[in-house]
Image (tube, grey):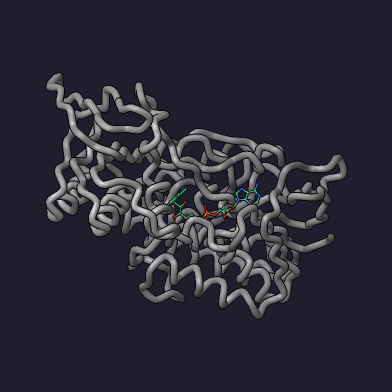
Amino acid sequence: MKTDVLIIGGGPAGLNAAIETASRGIKTIIIEESYALGGQLKQQTQFFNNLPKQFDRQRGIHLMRTLIDRLSPLPVTCLLKHKMIGVYKDGRIGIANDTETFPIDAKKVIVTTGAAEETDLFPGWTLPGVMTVGAAQILINRERVLPGKNALIVGLNSFSAEVTKQLKACGINILGVIDKNVSVNDKKLVDGLEDKKIRVMVNTVIERATGAGEVEKVTINNDGKKEDLDIDLICIGKGLSPILEPLEILDCEFGFQAKLGGLVPKYYSTLGTSNPSVYVAGNAAGITCLGGILVTAEIAALNALKALGVLNDNEAKISSSFLWDELRSMESEESIETFIARVAHIKEFHEECELPLPASFHAILEGC
Ligand SMILES: Cc1cc2nc3c(=O)[nH]c(=O)nc-3n(C[C@H](O)[C@H](O)[C@H](O)COP(=O)(O)OP(=O)(O)OC[C@H]3O[C@@H](n4cnc5c(N)ncnc54)[C@H](O)[C@@H]3O)c2cc1C
């Protein structure tokens, strides 16, 4: 197969990038390893207010439908249950499904593989009934299965707080949300949980989980004071980190940015990586809010279009400066630290490559 743009990952970032490229008539292929498009939006029933201008306030699952509907009349080929697994010596991308492996010859590749959940290790963590918050969210919202009756949540962040409220709304008794360190920035999250009568325990760690064949009891340690809780569900929410394997295979360089989820590909203000044909967007380019995921996809697609000669310099410059303003506004709404880390990450890579930042980017730097 041959294509102008190959998108790896059919979540919100991949879908939005494909809408941008295909609506300009550019031949686009999406590779998605799962059975359906939508990525992790498939189980996000909560409302999202902070979205780019072209989207109304809506639930995650409805946004998934909106994106798929916008994509369906466009010249896009979606290969479901296909995974990017390698690169051939001549640069073609290796794709596999259950039965075969074949190459795709792509002029530009946009990697939108999303993020994986971080977990926590403690004695008893392999017992049935111990899972990530994302797994619990999939069970209640996608599979319609209650994962337990009495739950402890380990780790406080916006994702775990949201899932905790969803579990409670399903009738699960939440015995508490524990975290070792809670910063002043988390006060809004703590207040939101306490408003719902959910106990938040800071300076608290899990010591062990025990049970005969499944989790039945957990011992927590609050500043030296131990407490045993009868539970049948432990949900671990230790945050997310970008999925990087396809970028490693594509020989992209990486840098460390704690606020973007740890190891992230190095990229320019175009979201182009150290591999000249590869762009990155969505959570693969650093953990961010849904608005940030959608806007980074537009920035990457816009620059791929420019590199393909579909947009001229002036068109790209105007759109790019509009999109960076929008990204700043989306990310500042949730946490300005993400935007500052992203800008620092980009600036570092431009300096390393002795490549001046575009003039429009200086205004952004001053704003930070
Ligand atoms: C289980 C889970 C639940 C989440 N729930 C929330 C939530 O409630 N709220 C929130 O704000 N955030 C949540 N997140 C974070 C989530 O990453 C973002 O909400 C958002 O979906 C990210 O969009 P994305 O397009 O960057 O990636 P994703 O939505 O993750 O989409 C990436 C897609 O790439 C595909 N893929 C990955 N590697 C390959 C490959 N090699 N070949 C082909 N396809 C590939 C995956 O199957 C996936 O469909 C959740 C994350 C997880 C893992």
Q: Residue furthest bottom?
A: 73
Residue found at x 64% / y 61%:
303
Viewer can see residue 346: yes
Residue 297, quarter of picture: bottom right
Position above or below: 243 against 294: above
At which x and y percent is residue 286?
48, 46
Position above or below: 354 against 75: above
Q: How many marks?
A: 0
Residue found at x 53% / y 71%:
67
At which x and y percent is residue 223?
15, 23
Q: Residue furthest front?
A: 212
Residue found at x 38% / y 55%:
145
Q: Quadrant of the N terminus?
A: bottom right
Q: Nearer the viewer, residue 92 or 137?
A: 137
Residue 14, quarter of picture: bottom right
Viewer can see residue 336: no
Q: Residue furthest top?
A: 224
